[in-house]
Image: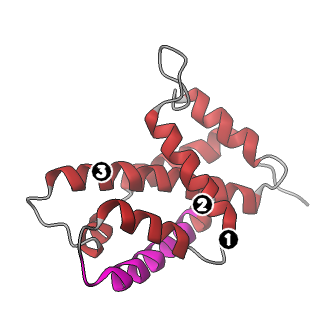
Amino acid sequence: MQTTYAESDLFENFDALLETYDISNELMVFELGKFHFLRKRKAKQELKALFYALWKLALKQSFPDDYERFFSTYCKDNNLEKDAAGNATTFFRSVEVYNTLLAEHGTSNFSNVADFLTDQLVKDSSRREYITLKLALSIRSTYNLIFQKLIAN
């Protein structure tokens, strides 16, 4: 017997996950202190975009025939794709960058995404490789959480 899930259930689960998403661990991995205001703001935007892309990847794993429709409907319902002028929003473009990066390895390896984020947010650190590795593990953990809670009640 196959169980079907309503889009609204998927969307509500994602909204709840997004609302409780805590990026403090990633900020510590990036070694951003309390006075790195601009980089923290950039990190928050990038990590939120990555969260959306990880959700799309989890949708693809669970609903290979419908994931694009689910993701597109959610983005349209929440006005994420286009601004008032009909142009793609900066946020949605960021999500698409992460979708492209995640498509390269799927769920098997998140190091390319971690490397991209490290390039964006870490300046002149002798610990780049360490930061990238820790971040890849954090991204995997976040993906696993999203995947496990995707259809949870």
Quadrant of the rendered structure where residue 12 is? top right
Q: Position of residue 130 (x, y in %)?
A: 35, 86
Q: Residues within 10 Å of mark 1 (few under 14, many from 20)?
A: few
Segment colored magenta: 125-146
Q: Position of residue 112 (x, y in %)?
A: 54, 71
Asked if residue 13 is positioned above or below residue 129 in the image, the reply reads: above
Examine the rendering and report whether any part of residue 13 can be seen: no
Which callout, 3 or 1, points at the residue further toward the start of the chain? 3
Check disc 1 and give the amino acid type: His
Q: Residue at x 29, y 75 (%)?
A: 29
Is 39 on the left or on the right of 103, as rendered?
A: left
Q: Position of residue 73 (x, y in %)?
A: 66, 33
Main secondary structure of the magenta stretch? helix
Quadrant of the rendered structure where residue 82 is? top right
Check disc 3 and give the amino acid type: Lys
Mark 1 element type: helix
As drawn, the label of residue 42 is: 3
Residue contact at pointers 3 and 2, CB within 8 angstroms: no
Q: Residue at x 24, y 67 (%)?
A: 123
